[in-house]
Amino acid sequence: MIKRLTTSDLSMIEKLLEEENRETLNPENIRSFLSDTSNYFLAFIHNEQILGYALAYTLARYDGRESMMYLHEIEVKESARRKGIGKKLLNEMNNICEQNGFMKLFLITNKSNKPAVALYESLSGEASNDDDIVYTFKS
């Protein structure tokens, strides 16, 4: 089952983060993320356990065109990989985009991340070009 998680699912998320050794995350930050309706935390749940999840943000446009969705993270537990969970999560994100009139769903990955590239291409994802560079700036 895929579910968009809300603040009522906080304990389930905290358990997942503990299992992933992400104990440094603050529950209030997670609550704040989940409270913002422009954020999406989709989870693939089986037997009350999160086996995979996807995090995305709505990006509103200043020019009046339709919003876009940025997929920031998609993760499937190692023991549950290669069972279609990543595809199901990505398909659900696409469904949300269609239902809400988003212009597109996009993400950034590395060519060296072969499993991710294979997943995105298997779902007809298209790389816009072969020479993108991502710059980051520390504040």
Image (cartoon, rainbow, N blue to C red):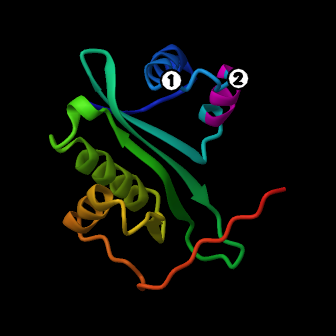
User: Is 76 colored magenta in this rendering?
Assistant: no
Q: Position of residue 27 (x, y in %)?
A: 65, 21
Q: Is residue 112 left or right of residue 73?
A: left
Q: Amino acid at mark 2?
A: Glu
Mark 1 Cα-neighbour bin, 10 Å: few <14, some 14–19, many ≥20: few
- The quadrant where residue 48 appears: top left
Q: Position of residue 21 (x, y in %)?
A: 50, 23
Q: Residue furthest front?
A: 112
Q: Residue at x 44, y 22 (%)?
A: 16
Q: Which mark, residue 21?
A: 1
- The quadrant where residue 23 appears: top right
Report the magenta stretch's main SS. Answer: helix
Question: Eyeballing the image, is 137 above or below 52?
Answer: below
User: Is 28 colored magenta in this rendering?
Assistant: yes
Q: Residue at x 51, y 43 (%)?
A: 40
Q: Residue at x 38, y 52 (%)?
A: 93
Q: Position of residue 119 (x, y in %)?
A: 25, 58
Q: Nearer the viewer, mark 1 or mark 2?
A: 1
Q: Residue at x 24, y 62 (%)?
A: 118
Question: Eyeballing the image, is 25 above or below 58?
Answer: above
Q: Amino acid at mark 1?
A: Asn
**Residue under label 2:** 28
The quarter of the rendered structure image containing the C terminus is bottom right
Q: Which mark, residue 64?
A: none
Question: Eyeballing the image, is 122 above or below 18?
Answer: below
Which span of residues is magenta-colored?
27-33
